[in-house]
Amino acid sequence: MTTSHLYTRAYGAAPAGLWSAPGRVNLIGEHTDYNNGLVMPFAIDARAHMAVGRAAGQEVKVVSAQQDFTVHSFRLDEIQQGSPSARGWPGYVYGAIWALREAGYPLAGGLNIAIDSSVPVGAGLSSSAALECVTTLAVSQLMGIDLTQRDVALLSQKAENDFVGMPCGLMDQMASSACTAGNVLFFDVQAQTTEQVPFDTAAAGLSLLVIDTHVHHQLADGEYAKRRQSCEQAAAELGVPFLRAVDLAGLDAALAQLSDDVLRRRTRHIVTENARVAQTVELLRARRFDGVGQLMVDSHASMRDDFEISDPALDLAVEVSLDAGAAGARMTGGGFGGSAIALVETDRAESLSAAVRAAFAAQGRTAPTIRSVAPSEGARRDG
Ligand code: GAF
C-alpha cells in the first residue's frame, strides 16, 4: 500500500503532498561527528515515505504501515519532552514537529500524517533520522516554511537530542537531508562544509554490500552517551573544545597528557579516524578505490579495540568478508550491533555473501540480510 492509500484509508481524504527521506550508510568516520570531526556517509535507497495533509483543530495524527495501522493522536500545543508521545517511533515524528515549534516557526492547525518506511529499524542505517528528516521537511513545506537542507538536519537533530533523548551528532540527519545520488557526502562538522564526492563503485567493478547482522542496537541505552562523555572528558583534560583539535602529529603528546587508558584509547580512535576520513576523501576525489579498503579495515580495528563499539556478529561479518576477498570491511553507524559494510569486486559479491551466511549459520546466528547499495538521493518532495 502506498502512503497515499494509507493516508486515504486512515483519514478519508487525499493528502496534500508526499515526501520521503533516506536512511544512510557511513563509509568511514565513526563517532567523529560529535567531536567536530569528519564523516563520509551516503544515502541508501531505503526511505521513509510520508503523506501529509492539514486537518481542522489542533490534533496531530500519525499512522504507520509498520505499526499495525493504529492512529496515534496528540494536540500540537501539548507535545512536550518527556510526554507519552516521546516514546517509541511516534516520538521521532512528534519530536520533529516539537523542534519546529520550539524554533519559533508558526505551526497552526491540525495535521494528518501517514508513514511507510523501508529503512530497517535497529540495523544502524538511521531509520530514526529518516523519519525525523521527512517530518521536518514535509511539515515545514506544508506550512510554507522555507528551510535549507542544513536547517532540516539541525531541527531533526534537535528532535533526537532533546525530545527523544539520544545525544547523537549531526551526521545522520545531514546525510538524510543533504546527500545526492552517486556521491558520498564529505561533511566537515567543524567547518560546517559539505562536499559531494563521486562514489561510483560500479564503474570500478566494485560493490558495496551492507550486512545487517540483526543484532539490534539501541543507541539510547547509554553506551553511545558514555562514548560521547569520554570524548568530552578527554577534550577537557587536553584543554581543547573538541578532540578535532588534536591531529595525528599531536596524538602522542596528547595521549601522554591523559589520565587513564580508556581515555587514551577513545582519543586515539577519534584522531586516527579523522585522519582516515581525510585520506579517503583524497583517494575518492582522484576516483581511486585502491587504499580505501585498507582504511576501512583500519577503521574497524580502531572501533573494535580502541573505541570498543563493535560486537561479535559485526566482527564475524568483517572477518569473513575479508577472508572471502573483500578489499575492505567495517562496521557502520553507532555500533553495538547493526550493520557492517564490505567493499568487494562485484564478481565476488555472491560468494562473499554465501560465506558470511554460512559463518553465521555455523555459529547458530540469525541469518544476516545482505544487500548491495549505491548512493541515493536525500530528502525530497515526491508529489
Ligand atoms: C549514530 C549517531 F546518531 C551519529 O550522530 C554518529 O555519531 C554515529 O552513530 C557514529 O558515527 O548513528
Image (tube, helix red, strand yellow):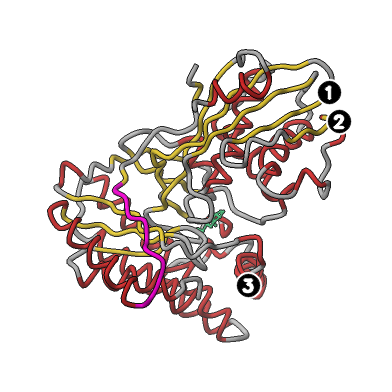
Frontmost of labels 1 and 3 is 1
Crowd band around label 3 with a 10 angstrom C-alpha radius: few (<14), some (14–19), many (20+): some
The earlier-in-sequence mark between 1 and 3 is 1
Crowd band around label 2 with a 10 angstrom C-alpha radius: few (<14), some (14–19), many (20+): some
Location of residue 74 with respect to 251 vertically, above or below = above
Q: Which mark is residue 77?
A: 2
* Image coordinates for residue 287, horizontal then vertical, percent: 21, 45
Q: Residue furthest right?
A: 78
Image quarter of residue 151: top right
Relative horizontal placement of residue 205, taking residue 77 as reference (left or right): left
In terms of secondary structure, where does tag 3 sit? helix
Image quarter of residue 144: top right
Q: Amino acid at mark 3?
A: Ser
Q: Amino acid at mark 2?
A: Asp
Identify the residue under disc 1.
Answer: 58
* Image coordinates for residue 240, horizontal then vertical, percent: 62, 65
Location of residue 83 with respect to 109 vertically, above or below = below
Disc 1 and disc 2 in contact, CB within 8 angstroms: yes
